[in-house]
Image (cartoon, rainbow, N blue to C red):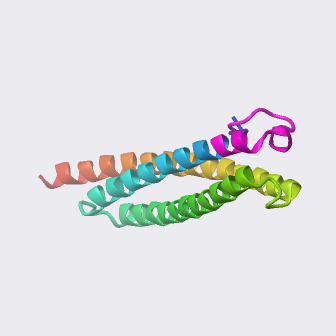
């Protein structure tokens, strides 16, 4: 599952009309907004359990995943900004096909798609790490609570 593209393979980006690229970009925006909401949920999950931590090693692990979450959240925000700007440019191209250099714009579109694909891979890895560490922390902290009872 190394290719997370939402379009047909080949020369689609260079052959598609502006409206098709606009629809594809709207899908990217929708996906990124979903990921942004999921990142908020993960942040809430971490915050909820952080206050109950008692073991130093768990505090360190949670801080590490918080930092990775901040990084991936920033990456998502930056991509959303780029997608919004890209949508604006696409709308301009739909109105006036000669507004921008077509080849350069399509190359930028492909670069944006590659950036989104990389983000999705990073997001999934990050999410998996968060759940793995959260599960470990909850189990180890529960053992500490039971021993102290």
Task: Please say whether residue 59 is one of the residues in the magenta stretch.
Answer: no
Residue at figure coordinates x 40%, y 61% from the top left: 62
Residue 52 on image: x %, y %: 24, 60
Residue at figure coordinates x 81%, y 34% from the top left: 9
Can residue 111 be seen in the rendering of this structure?
A: yes
Task: Please say whether residue 13 is one of the residues in the magenta stretch.
Answer: yes
Q: 1 or 78: which is nearer to us?
A: 78
Residue 116 on image: x %, y %: 65, 51
Residue at figure coordinates x 76%, y 55% from the top left: 96
Residue lying at the far top in this picture: please name it.
Answer: 8
The quadrant in which residue 88 appears is bottom right
Q: 85 or 61: which is nearer to us?
A: 85
Residue 94 on image: x %, y %: 72, 50
Query: Above or below — where is 105 with respect to 71?
Result: above
Q: Which residues are magenta?
A: 5-23
Can residue 133 be seen in the rendering of this structure?
A: no
Residue at figure coordinates x 27%, y 57% from the top left: 48
């Amino acid at each position: 599952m190394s290719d997370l593209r939402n379009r047909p393979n080949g020369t689609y980006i260079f052959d598609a009309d502006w409206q098709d690229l606009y629809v594809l970009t709207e899908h990217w925006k929708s996906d990124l907004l979903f990921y942004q909401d999921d990142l908020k949920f993960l942040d809430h999950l971490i915050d909820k359990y952080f206050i109950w931590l008692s073991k130093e090693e768990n505090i360190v692990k949670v801080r590490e995943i918080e930092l990775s979450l901040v990084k991936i959240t920033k990456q998502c925000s930056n991509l959303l900004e780029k997608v919004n700007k890209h949508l604006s440019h696409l709308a301009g191209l739909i109105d006036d096909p000669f507004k921008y250099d077509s080849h350069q714009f399509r190359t930028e579109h492909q670069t944006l798609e590659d950036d989104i694909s990389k983000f999705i891979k990073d997001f999934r890895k990050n999410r998996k790490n968060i759940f793995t560490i959260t599960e470990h922390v909850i189990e180890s902290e529960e053992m500490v609570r039971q021993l102290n009872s």
